[in-house]
Image (spheres, rainbow, N blue to C red):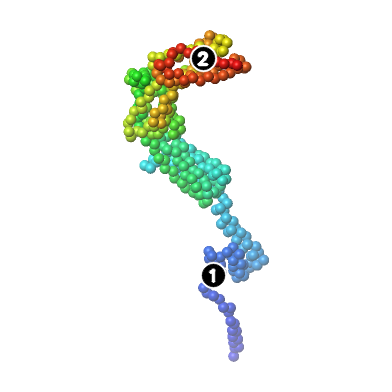
Amino acid sequence: MPLIVLVFFNPPSVDRHSQPNQLGSGFSDTERLEANQVGSQNMQPGKDKQEAPQTIQSQVATELSRENATTNDNVTLSGWVGTEFGEFVGGETVVLHSPSQKTHYSTVTGVSGEYKLIHIKPGWDYILKVYPQGPFNSYTKTQLKLSAAQEMQNIILEPIPLGTLTGRIADPYDRPVTGIELLVTTVEKEYRTTNVVTDANGDFSVTEFPKGKFQVATRGQHTIKATGLIFDPGTHVPVILTIDLGPFSLKGDIYDESGQTFDGADVILIRALHDNGTSMRSIRKVSANARGEFRFTGLGPGKHELIVSAWRRDTFKKTIRKTINVGVDSGELMVVVNTL
């Protein structure tokens, strides 16, 4: 009869619910390394067991470096600039800076309002700004935190209300001042200056003018400047300005205490008016002739400040100030400069 041999053995107990090669998210880096090393004991036949620990350690190091890449890599910030009505705004400069890191980035939006800032260092105190060239208010966002590799920040610009600015220039007797060239300049937004000329009624107007503070000025030997003016397109209230013009004149002579004249002295006459936050200044400037004489014409009535600056080469210089009530005081002055 043939001989039959039966061999019995007890297999090692195995937890069928354990998965040694799949690690939960709650493991620490050390636990991951130890677990991967335990799992490597059941490698496929033919693999060199001496290479396994090095391979697994390399895999763990790679995984850790990937986790830290988010905090160490640079950030890309992108988005678009537009209006609340969904209109994109191109050609605007977007500025980003961090006070703590002293970093500064800028770019210009494309035709579809898109922008992208790259190679940004992660930070928590970034300030994002846009200074629009068009009729929009400036945009600022502070305490912007940038940490992810890709960040998006869309920017909505608030439009500035526009309207037609109207005004009238008159003298102290309410007579229109015609043909005078004015420089109308915005103050709250980037300086925008418009040249206008008053018509036969002393009127002027500027279309598509932005809401906010502005000023009106002229150029030349007789300069006029009105400040503190505010335009609101919703009120349609014209600006009425009274400038220093009238039938009066003022002349004078400049001498020293010995009776010698001061030729070439600078003489300035200022008329200032203040009303409800609005300031109107009229400044005239002339030079004394070789006989020390000066003259102003076309003055309006009221108090004016006279400033005389006299000098003789590099040895002497003095400034004298006087208040003159034009229309009341004498139109002829004698200014004595004490050189002692």
Residue 335: mark: 2
> 10 above or below 205?
below
**Residue positioned 34% across, 20% down in the render:** 174
**Residue positioned 59% across, 58% down in the render:** 64
Task: Name the one closer to the observer, 50 or 210.
Answer: 210
Element at label 1: loop
Q: Mark 1 = which residue?
A: 19
Residue 196: image x %, image y %? 39, 23
Count of number-bearing discs: 2
> 57 above or below 219?
below
**First of labels 2, 1 by sequence position:** 1
Res 250 seen here:
yes
Quadrant in the picture for the C terminus: top right
Task: Name the one closer to the observer, 218 or 76.
Answer: 218
Which amino acid is tagged 2?
Val
Distance CA(mark 2)–CA(mark 1)? 107 Å
Which amino acid is tagged 1?
Gln
